[in-house]
Amino acid sequence: MAMDTNPAGEAQQVAIWARMTPAEKWAAFEDLQATAIALVEAGIRLRHPQATGREVFLRRVARTLDRSTMLRAYGWAPEDTA
């Protein structure tokens, strides 16, 4: 399936996933999601060291929502950098 993964290792991972309960799979997904959010927010903090917690949140959300939706939902959108 994956071009960069050893087939034996991938088979072992698939076997592990097959043994997991739906609750365990959901918990693994939540952990992965939390890690991804933390990494994105760390990058935002590096680029915007003076940002408040709220601004970090807004900048993260702005990565997935268009400007119009950001303005309607949060009354904020990041400055244009073009």
Image (spheres, rainbow, N blue to C red):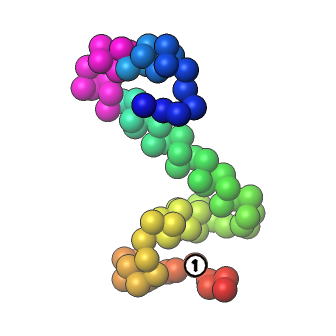
Q: Say above or below: 60 vs 22.
A: below
Point out the stretch of residues depicted in magenta. Answer: 15-26
Q: Is residue 4 left or right of residue 8?
A: right
Q: Is residue 34 magenta?
A: no
Q: Magenta stretch: residue 22 in it?
A: yes
Which of the pair 81/44 is nearer the observer?
A: 81
Q: Which three-letter amino acid code belongs to the residue tagged 1? A: Pro
In the rendering, at what x and y percent does residue 77 appear? 52, 80
Image location (x, y in percent) of residue 75 = 44, 82
Point 52% across, 49% down: residue: 37
Instruction: Say which quadrant the N terminus sits in.
Output: top left
Q: Would residue 78 appear left or right of 31 to someone viewing this image?
A: right
Dot 1 lies on which element? Answer: loop
Q: Dot 1: within a 10 Å radius of its alpha carbon, few (fewer than 14), some, or many (20 or more) residues?
A: few
Where is residue 69 drawn, in percent x and y? 38, 79
Task: Count every numbered label the image shows and give the total.
Answer: 1
Residue in the foreground of this view, choosing between 3 and 40: 3
Instruction: Examine the rendering and report whether any part of residue 54 can be seen.
Output: no
Magenta: main secondary structure equals helix
Q: Residue at x 44, y 13 (%)?
A: 12
Identify which residue, 10 or 63, lies in the foreground: 10
**Residue 59 visible in the picture:** yes
Looking at the rendering, in which quadrant would you find the C terminus?
bottom right
Name the residue at 29% across, 18% down.
18
What residue is pinned by disc 1? 78
Query: Image quadrant of residue 50?
Result: bottom right
What is the quadrant of residue 66 in the picture? bottom left
Q: x, y percentage for residue 72?
A: 37, 83
